[in-house]
Amino acid sequence: MAADPRPHPARKIVRVAVSTALVVAAFGFALPRFASYPSVWASVDAMTWPRTLLVAVAAAGSMAAVWIMICSVLPSIRLREAAAVNLGSSVVANTMPAGGALAMGVSWAMLSSWGVSTEEYILYTLVSGTWNVFARLGLPVLAALVLLTDGRPGTGLIAAAAVGLALLAGAAAGLSLLIRSESFALGAGRALQRSLTVIFRLVRRQASFDIPGSLAGFRSRAGALITVRGWRITAATLASNLTLWLVLLACLRGVGLSQGQVPWQTSLAAFASVRLLTVLPITPGGLGITELGLVGILAAGGGHGVSPDVSHSTMAQVTAAVLLYRAVTYLLPIPLGVIAWLTWRHSPWLLCARSGAAAENHDALAGRCQDARSATSSRHARR
C-alpha cells in the first residue's frame, strides 16, 4: 500500500507551536528587557518629517531592488509583474509557519499565468535562491573586512565570517563543478537520490523523482543563463541585499542615532550576522529572531556597538530603529501583497499587458541562451 504523502498533523502542530513560542518569547519577554514599548514609541513619534521621508525612500528603493533582481533572472517578465509576484508571495511567507513552500506556489501560479514555463520557473527559483544564499554567506565576510577599517572585529563576527566564507567557497565550488562537469552532476544526483530515498522511506513517503535527470537539465539551462546574464544577476542580488541594509541604517539615523553612537560599520555587521542566522526559516520571515538578533548585536559592547553603560533613551532608540526597520520591510509588504494578489486575480490586465518590444527582447535573450547552451555543449563534446 502506498504511503500517505500528507505530512502528519502532529508535525504541523509542533512546528506552529515552536514558531509561536519563539515569537512570543522575543516580543513578550526578551525585547522589553532592552527597552519598554512606550519608550520605543516615543522615539518613533519624535522623528521629523525629513527623517521619515528618508526611511520611506530607503524602503521603496529596497523593494525596487528586489524586483529588478527578479527581472534579471526572469527577463521575460516586466517590473510590474516582478513587483506583484514578490509582494504576493511575501504575504504567505511572512504570515505562515514554513510559508516558504506555499509562497513558491503563489509565485508559480502568478508567473505561469503570464506565460512562464515550468522549466523557466524552476530555473528562476534555483538560481535566485542560490545567489541569495551566496549573498547571505558573503555578507559577514564583507562586514568583517569593513570593520577592519574601524578596529578589530568582534569574536562573533569573525566566527560568522569564517563560517560564511567556508560555506560560500564550498557552495561556489560545488555549483561550478555542477555546471562544468557532467560526471560530477550525475554523481551528485545519484548520491542525493539515494539519500532522499532513504529519508522518504524513514518517514513512510513515496519517493517519485529523478534527481540525476533534473540536475542534468538544470546544469544545461543554468549554464546558459549564467553565461548570458550572470553578471547582471550577481549585481542585482548584491544590490538587493545592500539596499535592505541601507533601510536599517536609515532607521537608525531616522530615530536620531548618530555615527558616534552606532557606526554604519556596526549596523552592517549586525545586518550580516542576522541574515546568516536566518538562512533557515524557523519563524515566518524570521519574525522575533531578526528583531532580537539586531537589537542584541547593536546593543553589544566591545567597541563596535552601543556602550554597555548606555542610557535608557539610547537603548530605546536602538530598539525603535530595529522595530521600525521591521515594520517597513516585514509588515508593509503584507498589505501591499494583498493588493497585488487581488489585482492579479480580478484585474490581471493591469499587470500582464505586454508590448511588442518586450516580446522581442525575450525572444532575443532566448536566442542568446540557446547559443550559449550550444557552445557549452560543443566544448564538453570536444573534451
Image (cartoon, rainbow, N blue to C red):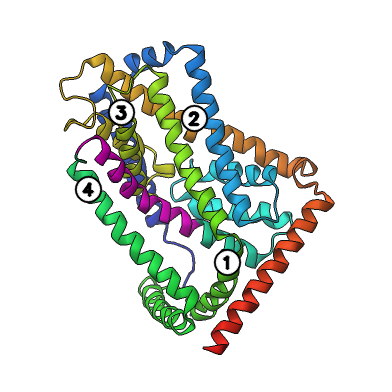
Whole-angstrom CA distance, mark 2 to mark 4, is: 29 Å
Q: How far from the left and from the top, in percent, is residue 157?
A: 24, 44
Res 104 → quadrant:
bottom right
Q: Nearer the viewer, mark 1 or mark 4?
A: 1
- For this rendering, which residue is in front, 221 or 119? 221
Disc 2 vs disc 1: Cβ atoms closer than 8 Å? no
* Residue type at the position of mark 4: Ile
Q: Nearer the viewer, residue 206 or 226?
A: 226
Labels 2 and 4: the sequence-earlier one: 4
Q: Which residue is mark 1?
A: 227
Residue 150 in the magenta stretch? The answer is: yes
Q: CA distance from mark 1 to mark 4?
A: 34 Å
**Disc 2 designates what residue?**
328
Which residue is drawn at the image coordinates 48% and 77% (left, top)? 180
Q: Is residue 176 above or below residue 137?
A: below
Mark 2 vs mark 4: give the one in front: 4
Span shown in magenta: 129-151
